[in-house]
Image (cartoon, coloured by chain):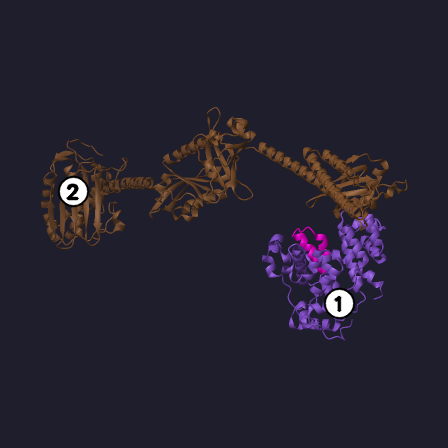
Amino acid sequence: MRSAAAPPPLDAESVRKLLQSGGGLPSVPAVVTSVLTLLENPRASFAEVGRAISMDQALTAKVLKLVNSAYYGFPREIATVTHALILLGLDTVKDLVVTASVMKEFSADSLAAFDPEAFWLHSLGCAVATKAVAEHLRYRASGEAFAAGVLHDIGKLLLARHYPDLTELCVHNAKEERLSMRQAELGVIGVDHAEVGGWLAEAWNFPPAMAAAIRYHHRPLAASEEDSGLVAMVHIGNVVVRRAGFGDGGGGDRAEVDAELLKSKTGHKLRLHQLAVDEVVAELPGRMEGAQAFLRVLDVGKDEKGK
Amino acid sequence: MSSEAHCEVPLPGLPPLAEGSRGADTTVASAATGTAPREAPRESDHAAEQISRLQREIGELRRAFAELELVQSLQRSISERRDTAGVLGQLLGACGQIVELCGGAVFLTVEGSGELTIGAEDRLTESQRRSIMLMAEDGILDWGIRAGRCTIVPDIAGEGQGSRVNFVIGPMVAGSERYGACVLATERSADAFVRQELDLIEVLCGQAAVALANARLILRLEKERNKSAAILQSVGVGLFTVDRDCVTTSANSAAEDILGFSAEEMVGGHCRTFFDRPFCGTSCILREDTPDRADLEATLAHKGGRAIPTIMTAVKLRDPDGRIVGAVETFKDITDLKQMTDRLRHLSAYNRNILESMTAGVLVVDLDFVITTINREGERTLELEPGSLENTPIYDIPALKEVSRELAHMLATAHSRSREELVRQEVTVLSGKGRRIPLGLSTALLRDEDGEITGCLGIFRDLTEIKKLEEQTRRAKWLASLGEMATGVAHEIRNPLSSIAGFVDLLTEELAEGDPARPYTEIMQSEIERLNNLVSSVMAFARPPQPELKMGDLNALLRRLAVQLERDVAARHARLELSLSPTLPAFAFDSGQITQALINLIRNALRAVEPGGAVRLVTALEFAEQEVAAPPVWASDHGAPKARANRVAIHVEDSGRGIPEAIRDKIFDPFFTTDRQGGTGLGLAITNRIISEHGGVINLVSEVGVGTRFTILLPLRLRSEPGESA
């Protein structure tokens, strides 16, 4: 579906219908589903997970490349996926699987509106920041924090794919009038990237908390109480990465943590008032170094598609 | 419990679960095999599904429960053991319940160097051991510890020998400290592992790490405590600590020695026990409002009752929040010190006494010319404020200028002086009141016991009195020799003079009356007469006339004298007044000599007054308490005569021109005269002589332009005694 032909739709419902009916929502890569499901079971053996990953050759290569990278510094060469899984740890593997698959999905797009490298850097930065925030708050489900962070702006890619001109306009407006991307999108397209991302998360059967994190990362208070923890952390992670200046999310406004969030029940539960956002911002460059190994590994995979 | 999902006690009515149920595949669990066939196939399928699902879940729960129990039992057994080897052994045992082990070892990180050493091992074969050591060398163990997660590494080294062993490396990390790693040898393949098992091993290793951390901490604490105790004991002063309530919590061996109590006796008791009297010093230090440290003197009581004087330092003890939790008191027995101090004080006082009792001034300066000592007599002599001199530099005091010069000279030439040399000088200083004082000064060097010079000493005396005496003696001698010479000359003149007189008489007789040469011989006769008188005066002056003391009436003498001198008085157009005391008794004096003396004085007075002026003669009886200083008098070797108490005063006053101060000393000198008409200049000298031979004194008060008063003071002798003199 090409947006140039159709007049711009004006509300969320219409966009959704259009996307759904026209196959605008890509289907989930098989490996993601299998790996994520396996990883939810603590009694899944490494062999099983290894088998699931081995189905995807590109992914396998990435895993091996990562475990043998200088960052991990294992004194011997790792040749089997299973061994790599054991050494990397299943959390890292999950992060890698999710990120690589999603990037692969969108790698064929020619994005005119914004620079893909800047986008992925921002997304990865948000993932790292979200994990950092989770660590600072001693939030236990930090395994999902990374994935949620990487995927939080996935809606932007979808919008860019289907409405490239409008997206360009949004970017332009946001910079000119110092708006957030969300405000620009609502004004121009009628729906924002968080909402769209939320649809994709549902379609891909992501765990509910992760879907909520994507959908509500700009409106953390709208999330349900169960999911509110992860949502809040992604929200703050987004603010952190924007303040630290990694990558570009496209917005022209100043990144601020929702003031209401601090006073809310979630805020109290997470003890947000104890979090020094500036501290996390200051730590980010150090943590990003670790993520660079990730980034390099992911770049290699993209080239196979001949982009 | 093995890691298979095997229930130890099967649920009643249900078969045990089969092996394949471990994986949570989306495929339906094959646990249904073994179930008895049901009657209604559809329903029973559904029910069987449900049942197997429930069985699975129950199995999960059991497993979880068993794992929890495993963790708890490890915790318990670790806490029961304090030794590291025991803890590690327990760890290996617990891990063995999760994974079937064929051997295991635990590596410990050496504190400080970070090296890994084997802390415990269990059933390791040689080749396994070698492989593990290789892994350690390669840094794989380090890697595993740093990764913070359980990892599985195949036995690559042993592969050559067909080893199918895999090593599970569990890091032992507590907080951010790394304590080592647990290495488990198992024949299970890496693939067959499940995350939960690795997680559990991590937990157990973490527990062991915490136990190790605690053990290390306890060891460190004990070392510190022993160190502190050793320090306390070895410290050379007595030390005890008290808590908030003044109860003794510890005491060192020095305290035991000094106080005679043993530490056991002291600890637990109120510290008042060994203070001599109710002593608030300790409770004072425990108060909030006092400074954190106090230095004081306190008297402690020995167990045997003796009082022990001490100097004590008390310091507050605070906890990390700043609250006062007690105090530390250190003390030193100063009994010996006190005795020595007392002795020193006595010695110092004794020395001071000596100094102050001396009748000469004593002055000591140090090498910087600062006055370190000066005694009372010294201050008095110099007429300086008492106490104003000590610790002042000597050159800040003008009165001591000459003295400081002498002392400086002494010090400057110190190297050339012998040890006991005392140098005597005479200097003149300006006293604190501005008086010029002659001082006799003896200076000497002060040396310490090593012979080093530490300062300079000066002993000085006011020489004023001595100098006066010297002056008087000198005058007396001078006058005596003068007298002798005059007598000799007079004698020599007498003979030729009488010869000349005789021939002038003959010559006069030869000459007739009216001869023009007659006036010449008359003049010659009168001049000869004059010369004769002079010679007589000189001889009278030279030969001490012993007064003949006879009882007489002085007033009557003076009246006769006034009559005798009427002509002289009239010639001067002056008046002679008499004021004679009616109570004057008769007393012994030489009337002829006294008359002579008075005549001289009166004649002088008459010469001094203007026409119309008056001369007064006064007699009075005086009762004097003290001696009166005598002006220079003609005296042989008797020393200065002093007027006695109970004496007679004769005043000769005139309202004449007065005697200038400059010549007041000289007027009694023989041959001194201001009379240009050529008196003998012996009048007053003779008067002086006469009075002093009587044992009296003559004083003079005069003011230029106003008048003069001569006062003769004679001792009141109520008996006649010939030749008596003072």
Disc 1 to disc 2, C-alpha distance: 157 Å
Chain seen in brown: B
Q: Residue at x 46, y 26 (%)?
A: B306
Chain seen in purple: A
Q: Are labels 1 and 2 on one chain? A: no
Q: Is residue B242 left or right of residue A40?
A: left
Q: Which quadrant would the N terminus of chain A be assigned to in this image? A: bottom right
Residue closer to the observer: B70 or A298: B70
Q: Which residue is mark 2?
A: B650
* Magenta stretch bounds: A125-146
Residue closer to the observer: A249 or B157: A249
Residue B438: % across, % down: 36, 44
**Vertical side of B551 occupied by B710: above or below:** below
Label disc, if present, on residue B354 of the rendered structure: none
User: Amino acid type of disc 2?
Assistant: Ile
Q: Secondary structure at mark 1?
A: helix
Q: Is residue B472 left or right of residue B136?
A: left
User: Amino acid type of disc 1?
Assistant: Leu
| Tag 1 subunit | A
Q: Is residue A293 visible?
A: no
Q: Residues within 10 Å of mark 2 (few under 14, many from 20)?
A: many
Q: Which residue is mark 1?
A: A19
**Vertical side of B45 occupied by B584: above or below:** above
Residue A97: % across, % down: 79, 56
Q: Residues within 10 Å of mark 1 (few under 14, many from 20)?
A: some
Q: Is residue A105 visible?
A: yes
Dominant secondary structure of the magenta stretch?
Answer: helix
Q: Is residue B214 left or right of residue B692?
A: right
Q: Residue at x 16, y 36 (%)?
A: B590
